[in-house]
Image: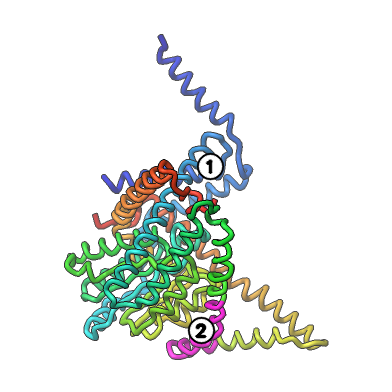
Amino acid sequence: MRRTILAGIVLVTGLLILVDLLLVNPSLTDAAGAVNELLVLLAAAAAVGGGATLVAHHVRVIGAGDGDSTGSIVLLAGMGAILVAGLRPGASGSSDPIVLWLVAALLAPIAASLFALLFIFLLGAVRRGFVLRARETSLMAGAAAVVIVLLLPVGGQAGDWLAASAGWVRDVPLAGVFRGLLIGTGILVAVSAARSMLALDRDDE
Amino acid sequence: MPNIGELAAYLVGLVTGAVGSSSMRLGAAPTVAILLVLLVLLSLIARTGARWSPSDLGGLRRVGRVMALAAESGADATISLGSAGVSRAASATDRYQTLAALPLLGHVAAAAARAGVPLRVTTNDPVAALLAQATLAGAHRRTATPERASSAAVEYIGEGRPVAAAVALATSGPHGVAVVAGGLAEDALLVLDGVLGDAEWSLAATAAPSQAAGPLLDGDGSLVGPALFQAAGELGAAGHARTAVLAANRLIWGALGLLLGGSLLTWAGGPQIAAFLTGR
């Protein structure tokens, strides 16, 4: 019974959003908007709950002293700094200059430095790939080497030929593989969503 | 006194009025095309038993054995649900990968519960954390191992893709079984390297085409592109209904608490948390 109710709610909601996508009707737009507002509310509640559990987890780590206490203290201090900056009397919330400064001067550089590690980790992944499946990784590394050669900043006739070849590789084989993956993913996303909506997957209840 | 004829006329007028005040958003041809695609999909999924033949995608059939080996060696298992989440500001295809990862989580969690291996699930989205908790509970119920439920934990690690990458790198260790399943973006290699690391057996799964190389290079088993959804379909969505009901119940209580708390704060003249939380 519970499963039927859930499947019914999912089906009706999904059809409402789908019909609103296809038709322009004020009532439908209002109903779909209400569903979206409800989703935003639920997500906000989950975000607050998630933040609370994050605090509780790291307070527990500090209290027990069995984990990375320093990391937990830094995390709690960071959360506190952002909350005080955004919620102090007279603050303008997430657009407050202090919040924006904290994001631009601290968070963005930290994230950028993390992503700067990608090159090193790519080399590490290639090494691991050679251990796991040497033949496929050799093929992948060979193709990558060819693309690097094609993208070399060489001038003259040879440079034009390399640039044209690099463009062809990007536009034909690479784009073909990407489109194939995207089309396959799109079809299976739709099938999978329909199976969930219509409750066609087996259940253990 | 209104009669049945008047009532019928009113209802007909209501329907025709609604139809008359509507117009097609996309034009006739695209609308028909979308409906046709839906019909084709319905015909594909109507006879599920005949259309879907299970295979061993990503080496998922080995999970039971590698989990038993992990139990013998005293190792643990870890799963990351990617960095797209369910309620985060990511594309719909990315977020749907998190939902597709739940059957994989259920499969691995059931194997961990049977073998008695501690399991840690990490996610950067609170809604995905709720769904993962319900999935773990379902796995322990299916395997009749409630006494081992305390050894499985879901950890919300904070918001953002950089956070997912940083936590993966900071907590990397020699796990017995390590799995990354879900939406990944530019953080893919960092998350994969950090979580899978030196695991005895690892599985990497993402449907993001631009990150296809990561799972192929880093995982013992890999699911790339549509294979993630195919594997999820083959495993079945066991307990999907229960998972959704449990997670939705918690979300509703959370929303009520938020409404009440926010209202009390506003009434008491405190800060407007709604604007801060939603960034408006």
Vertical relation: B54 (above or below) A123: above
> In which quadrant is the N terminus of chain A drawn?
top left
Residue at point 27%, 46% (across, down): A2
Numbered range of the magenta stretch: A113-139
Examine the structure image and report whether residue B32 is included in the region drawn in magenta.
no
Residue A121 image label: 2
Q: Nearer the viewer, residue B152 or A80?
A: A80
Examine the structure image and report whether residue A127 is included in the region drawn in magenta.
yes
Residue B41 image position (x, y, % from top left): 47, 54
Which one is earlier in the sequence, the residue at label 2 or at label 1? 1
Mark 2 vs mark 1: in front:
2
Vertical relation: B113 (above or below) B137: below
In this picture, residue A181 sits left or right of residue B48: right
Q: Which residue is mark 1?
A: A20
Q: Chain of mark 2?
A: A
Residue B62 image position (x, y, % from top left): 31, 78
**How many marks overall?**
2
Residue at point 51%, 22% (across, down): B13
Disc 2 residue crowd, few under 14, some 14–19, many 20+, Cα 10 Å: some
Vertical relation: B193 (above or below) A76: below
Q: Nearer the viewer, residue B194 or A29?
A: B194
Tag 1: residue type? Answer: Asp
Q: Secondary structure at mark 2?
A: helix
> In which quadrant is the C terminus of chain A drawn?
bottom left
Q: Is residue A34 visible?
A: yes
Residue at point 23%, 81% (across, down): B71
Residue at point 56%, 62% (across, down): A98
Tag 2: residue type? Answer: Phe
Q: Secondary structure at mark 1?
A: helix
In this picture, residue A77 sits left or right of residue A203: right
Vertical relation: A54 (above or below) B73: above
